């Protein structure tokens, strides 16, 4: 499993040309958001229940390295004001959920870093028949945040030069069970990444080359149920990368997958297989076909659910789109998190993650990263909460000094739930 395929956020504290097809401009964003909200409201009477839990958050933060990369980071403090607008509607045979998180971040000294971020997600699921399920997921983000220290495996595990970042993704999943003990599934998806220079922002360290990219992917698999609690299967995956500077690359993989659930308290997922990459990005020479790369890939996920908390462990080693840096890569990571759930007064989240980026192009340096994060929240009644957070990231490179980085960031915030809290205190600052 790749880093892009996992999620593990801590629920605490509550210019490219027009040829890029996946980009959403600031002008079109309100129209898209209006369409998503209207589609939720317009669902006919088959809807059973609608929930809306808005939240406002105000955070004061300080960081000792607002550049993200470089040994001599520049410190600054600022203000983060965010809004969360989650809408969820349950249907007779499924559900649909929409979430929009706009935020504004203001800096005290480096005002050129002031920015407005947008995080949008839309998820829908249904059961076309008794023995099948269909789900759809789409997302868009525009932010300066990277290497999210509050996630076990975000879309980009590693830090690089500070830029405006846009990412759009869409995925479709289908699963069917034609026989009592047999099931099959397939998925299709696409993602696009765009990186833009920040106007009037002067970096202290030499700029690290970044690369826009588009990815198309698909998987198909078959599984055999061994018992009510475990199953085993075989999965084939195909990914195609169109890289702005490095050319094109394809990645194929075959994996043996095992899943076990024990009384809704323990969930174990294990995959082991091999991959085979071909294309320009494995050679470092755009236009020169024939580069090849192969190896072992695998992943492990283990979650233990308690009455008011959960403990999760993930590990993975697989080909990746590579994040913002030139070319694709083979990413390895290990992460551990412990978070609260459905608590009345106190909320918390602890996370630690170690990752390594091994580039497909041997001319690019290997990068190692260590991340630790702690978030603590206290509910002050039904509508108000306070939160305290701290994030630490340390990154080193085998050859590229400009990739070395470390930063420490702390925040203190207030969260207001106009309609009452729903048990989570989300948000953050960038």
Image: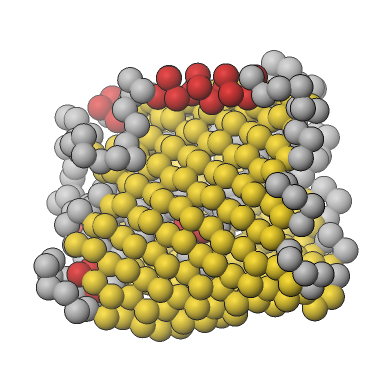
Residue 406 appearing in the image: no
In the rendering, at what x and y percent does residue 5 appear?
Answer: 52, 58
* Count of marks overlaid on the render: 0
Q: Left or right of 215: which side holds 279?
A: left
User: Residue 369 falls in which quadrant of the image?
Assistant: bottom left
Figure check: 426 above or below 7: above
User: Residue 430 falls in which quadrant of the image?
Assistant: top left
Q: Left or right of 212: which side holds 224?
A: right
Figure check: 64 above or below 42: below
Q: How is the image coloured?
A: secondary structure
User: Residue 195 falls in which quadrant of the image?
Assistant: top left
Residue at x-position 50% and y-position 22%: 35
In the rendering, at what x and y percent does residue 227 appear?
Answer: 84, 75
Residue at x-position 31% and y-position 80%: 293
Residue 207 appearing in the image: yes
Figure check: 246 above or below 213: below
Q: Left or right of 355: which side holds 129?
A: right
**In the depicted view, which residue is nearer to us: 100 or 287?**
287
Taking the view exactly as shown, the residue that stands out farthest to the top is: 418
**In the depicted view, which residue is nearer to us: 182 or 278?**
182
Residue at x-position 43% and y-position 20%: 31
**In the depicted view, which residue is nearer to us: 238 or 336?**
238
In the rendering, at what x and y percent does residue 113 appear?
Answer: 30, 30
């Amino acid at each position: 499993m790749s880093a892009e395929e996992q999620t593990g956020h801590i629920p605490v504290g509550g210019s490219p040309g027009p040829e890029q097809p996946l980009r959403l401009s600031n002008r079109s964003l309100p129209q898209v958001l209006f369409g998503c909200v209207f589609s939720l409201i317009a669902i006919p009477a088959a809807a059973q229940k609608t929930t809306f839990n808005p939240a406002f958050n105000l955070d004061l933060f300080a960081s000792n390295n607002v550049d993200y990369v470089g040994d001599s980071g520049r410190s600054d403090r600022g203000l983060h004001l965010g809004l969360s607008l989650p809408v969820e509607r349950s249907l007779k045979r499924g559900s649909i959920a929409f979430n929009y998180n706009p935020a504004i971040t203001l800096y005290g000294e480096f005002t050129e870093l002031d920015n407005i971020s947008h995080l949008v997600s839309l998820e829908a699921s249904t059961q076309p028949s008794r023995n099948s399920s269909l789900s759809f997921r789409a997302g868009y983000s525009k932010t300066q945040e990277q290497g999210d220290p509050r996630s076990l495996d975000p879309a980009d595990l590693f830090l690089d030069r500070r830029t405006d970042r846009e990412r759009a993704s869409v995925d479709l999943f289908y699963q069917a069970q034609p026989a009592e003990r047999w099931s099959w599934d397939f998925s299709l998806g696409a993602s696009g990444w765009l990186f833009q220079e920040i106007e009037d922002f002067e970096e202290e360290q030499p700029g690290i080359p970044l690369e826009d990219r588009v990815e198309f992917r698909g998987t198909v698999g078959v599984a055999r149920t061994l018992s009510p609690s475990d199953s085993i299967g075989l999965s084939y995956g195909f990914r195609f990368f169109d890289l702005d500077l490095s050319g094109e690359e394809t990645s194929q993989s075959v994996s043996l997958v095992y899943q076990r659930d024990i009384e809704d308290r323990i969930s174990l997922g294990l995959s082991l297989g091999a991959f085979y990459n071909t294309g320009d990005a494995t050679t470092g020479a755009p236009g020169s076909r024939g580069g090849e790369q192969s190896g072992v890939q695998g992943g492990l996920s283990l979650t233990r659910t308690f009455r008011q908390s959960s403990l999760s462990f993930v590990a993975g080693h697989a080909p990746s789109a590579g994040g913002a840096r030139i070319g694709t890569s083979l990413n390895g990571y290990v992460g551990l998190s412990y978070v609260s759930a459905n608590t009345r007064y106190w909320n918390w989240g602890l996370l630690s993650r170690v990752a390594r980026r091994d580039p497909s192009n041997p001319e690019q340096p290997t990068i190692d990263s260590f991340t630790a994060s702690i978030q603590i929240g206290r509910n002050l009644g039904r509508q108000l909460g306070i939160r305290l957070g701290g994030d630490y990231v340390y990154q080193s490179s085998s050859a590229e000094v400009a990739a070395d980085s470390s930063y420490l960031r702390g925040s203190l915030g207030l969260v207001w739930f106009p309609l009452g809290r729903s048990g989570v205190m989300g948000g953050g600052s960038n």
